[in-house]
Image: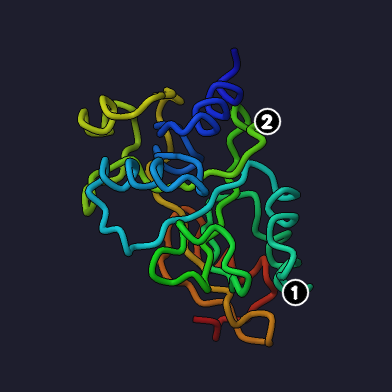
Amino acid sequence: MSDARTLEECVVGGGVAVFPADTVYGLACDPEDPAAVARLYALKGRPPRKPSAVMFFGVGPALAALPELGPRTRAALGALLPGGVTLLLPNPAHRFPLAGAGDPGTIGLRVPVVPALADVGVPVLQSSANLAGGADARRLADVPESIRAGADLVLDGGDLPGTPSTVVDLRGYEAGGAPAIVREGAVPAAAVRAALGAGPGAT
């Protein structure tokens, strides 16, 4: 069975998986399953009110799941995804509220470039596979043993780049606001601004 099929079956079945993204190793579960989300947070020791991202494995499914996004924001997604960015987007319909935690009006969106998982057909709630506040995992061996032992599935993708995603705030973008770089990571801030046609004055 392919890694994509195995991951999808784990998530649909209520499990928690360790998997390779295009940046660092991550944890994944069904974003609509309260018990699975609680287990993922417990494995990390992550505060329950801290939001997580929702990851899709294709741009088309991500756009289809968020029909409220305006044309300027949708164009931005087309310019930046797939890739090593997490986009903070407005979420007026409060979709995937478990991921939003204390801020259901915002959704963090990831669409990675992971060819082995490109056929995963469901979204996942995603967080890095480390203990809260700990170092990101570049190799499977870097994932804490307690997390690997507590997960229902562990996929080995070899050595990864090791730098987490760049976080870009696009919540004001539809109304003409500039993209804001919240955290520079795998994709340089200058590359984000260039892809969006934003000048150097963007934050």
Comparing 80 with 110, the one in front is: 110
Kindly give the residue lying farthest to the top in the view shown. 1
Quarter of the picture containing the N terminus is: top right
Residue drawn at x 31%, y 48% is 41
> Label 1, label 2: how many angstroms apart (C-alpha)?
27 Å
Residue on which the image places disc 1: 70
- Which residue is pictured at 38% across the width and 70% down the height? 102
Residue 90, image x and y in percent? 59, 73
Residue 139 placement: quadrant: top left
Mark 1 Cα shell of 10 Å, populated few (<14), some (14-19), many (≥20): few
Q: Is residue 72 left or right of residue 150?
A: right
Secondary element type, mark 2 = loop
Q: Is residue 127 above or below residue 159?
A: below
Q: Earlier in the sequence, mark 1 or mark 2?
A: 1
Please tell me in which quadrant of the rendered image residue 40 appears: top left
SS for dot 1: loop
**Figure check: 52 above or below 171:** above
Label 2: how many Cα within 10 Å (few below 14, some 14–19, many 20+): some
Q: Position of residue 20 (x, y in %)?
A: 46, 33
Q: Which residue is mark 2?
A: 119
Query: Given the image, on which type of amino acid does mark 2 rest?
Result: Asp
